[in-house]
């Protein structure tokens, strides 16, 4: 047992040989920890949704900045801004879904239904329709 008092430096002067307190993240739900495989699967799904969100946001930024001038006033923004907004919604909803899944697993409950596929599908369809309208009815 080390006779030094807590907070005194170790032999190298850094205090590195003293135990450190580990900061834990807030528990996403009360209950027992689920099988780590399910936790990792939930995390992989969360990360996949976030890759999708990042792709939507990057595409929206590219549309607003890199597309040639469209035959509709503000056409680039009409296409890009909804993509950016959809990406932000997908990112936020993916975190909410990850947390709800984690909570349900810890409580031994059925996983909640995800609204992400519907949100993404409806958003992409609407943006696609908007792109068709701009391309078909533009003044160019």
Image (cartoon, rainbow, N blue to C red):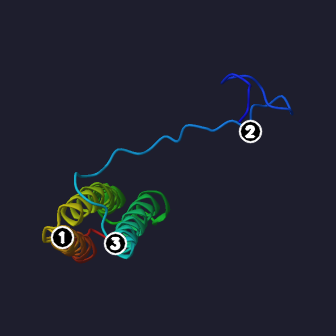
Residue at left 55%, top 37%? 21
Q: Is mark 1 on a helix, strand or loop?
A: helix
Q: Is mark 2 on a helix, strand or loop?
A: loop
Image quadrant occupied by the C terminus: bottom left
Disc 3 designates what residue?
Answer: 35
Up-down relation of residue 19 to residue 49 (above or below) = above
- Whether residue 56 is visible, yes or no, is yes
Which quadrant of the structure image shows residue 61? bottom left
**Which residue is outermost to the front?**
1
User: Residue 75 got which mark?
Assistant: none
Up-down relation of residue 36 to residue 102 (above or below) = below
Up-down relation of residue 126 to residue 64 (above or below) = below
User: Residue 17 got which mark?
Assistant: 2
Structural crowding at the residue carrying mark 1, measured as other residues with C-alpha within 10 Å and reported as few (<14), some (14–19) or many (≥20): few
User: Residue 126 got which mark?
Assistant: 1
Structural crowding at the residue carrying mark 3, measured as other residues with C-alpha within 10 Å and reported as few (<14), some (14–19) or many (≥20): few
32 horizontally vs 60: left or right: left
The answer to which of marks 3 and 1 sits earlier in the sequence is 3
Image quadrant occupied by the N terminus: top right
Frontmost of labels 1 and 2 is: 2
120 horizontally vs 52: left or right: left
The answer to which of marks 1 and 2 sits earlier in the sequence is 2
The answer to which of marks 2 and 3 sits earlier in the sequence is 2
């Amino acid at each position: 047992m080390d006779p030094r008092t807590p907070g005194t430096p170790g032999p190298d002067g850094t205090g590195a040989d003293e135990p450190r307190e580990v900061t834990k993240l807030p528990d996403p739900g009360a209950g027992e920890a689920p099988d780590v495989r399910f936790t990792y699967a939930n995390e992989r799904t969360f990360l996949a949704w976030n890759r999708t969100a990042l792709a939507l946001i990057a595409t929206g930024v590219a549309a607003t900045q890199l597309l040639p001038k469209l035959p509709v006033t503000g056409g680039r923004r009409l296409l890009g801004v909804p993509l950016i907004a959809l990406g932000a919604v997908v990112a936020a909803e993916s975190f909410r879904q990850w947390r709800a899944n984690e909570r349900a697993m810890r409580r031994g409950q059925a996983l909640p239904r995800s609204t992400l596929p519907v949100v993404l599908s409806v958003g992409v369809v609407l943006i696609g329709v908007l792109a068709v309208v701009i391309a078909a009815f533009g003044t160019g």
